[in-house]
Image (spheres, rainbow, N blue to C red):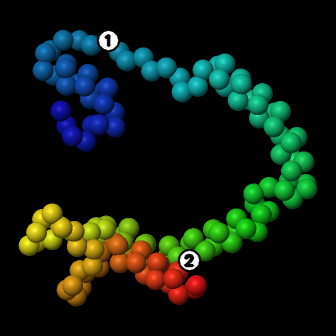
Amino acid sequence: MDQGDFLRLTKSMVDFVQAKTKLAVSPIHWPPFLSTRQLGFIVVATLVWIPFAIKKIMKSKTLLHDPKLWLAGSVFIYFFSVFDAMHNIIWKMPMFLADWNDPNKLVFFYQGSGMQLGAEGFWEIFLLWLMDF
């Protein structure tokens, strides 16, 4: 089987069986994502919920009106972007490496130049957090 066919596994398995055995396989019947009962329940629940949502929006008591949520989100984005987390994700930096001399030990800080491990970014956050106290 082709390794790239895992997303449509059922179809690729049918093609594989037909190619190897020369037998016809009946067509695959896929059920709908939502049944009519589930879809009806979602519509009724949404219609019942709409007046309560409008009332909360008018009173400004939603999560979008909470300044603490906005503060937490902005601090998270700041730390995420400043302290190497984005760099680690883009460049797929490992958090640690196995020590070459002793494979049972882990190396969290790379001694050479030109490489940084993911744990160093979290260490920077921790040190700055300690300086605030």
| In the image, residue 121 above or below residue 39 | below
Which of the two residues, 5 or 87, is positioned nearer the viewer here? 87
* Labels 2 & 1 near each other (Cβ < 8 A): no
The image position of residue 60, as x and y in percent, is 87, 59
Amino acid residing under circle 1: Ser
The image position of residue 26, as x and y in percent, is 32, 11
- CA gap between label 2 and label 1 equals 55 Å
Amino acid residing under circle 2: Tyr
Q: Is residue 84 visible?
A: no
Secondary structure under tag 1 reads: loop
Q: Which residue is mark 1?
A: 26
- Mark in the foreground, 2 or 1: 2
The image position of residue 10, as x and y in percent, is 32, 26
Task: Count the numbered circles shown.
Answer: 2
Residue drawn where x is 86% and y is 50% of the image? 56
Secondary structure under tag 2 reads: helix
The image quarter in which residue 3 lies: top left
| In the image, residue 27 above or below residue 99 | above
Which of the two residues, 102 or 117, is positioned nearer the viewer here? 102
Residue drawn where x is 35% and y is 73% of the image? 119
Which of the two residues, 110 or 89, is positioned nearer the viewer here? 110
Q: What is the number of the mark on residue 78?
A: 2
The image quarter in which residue 43 lies: top right
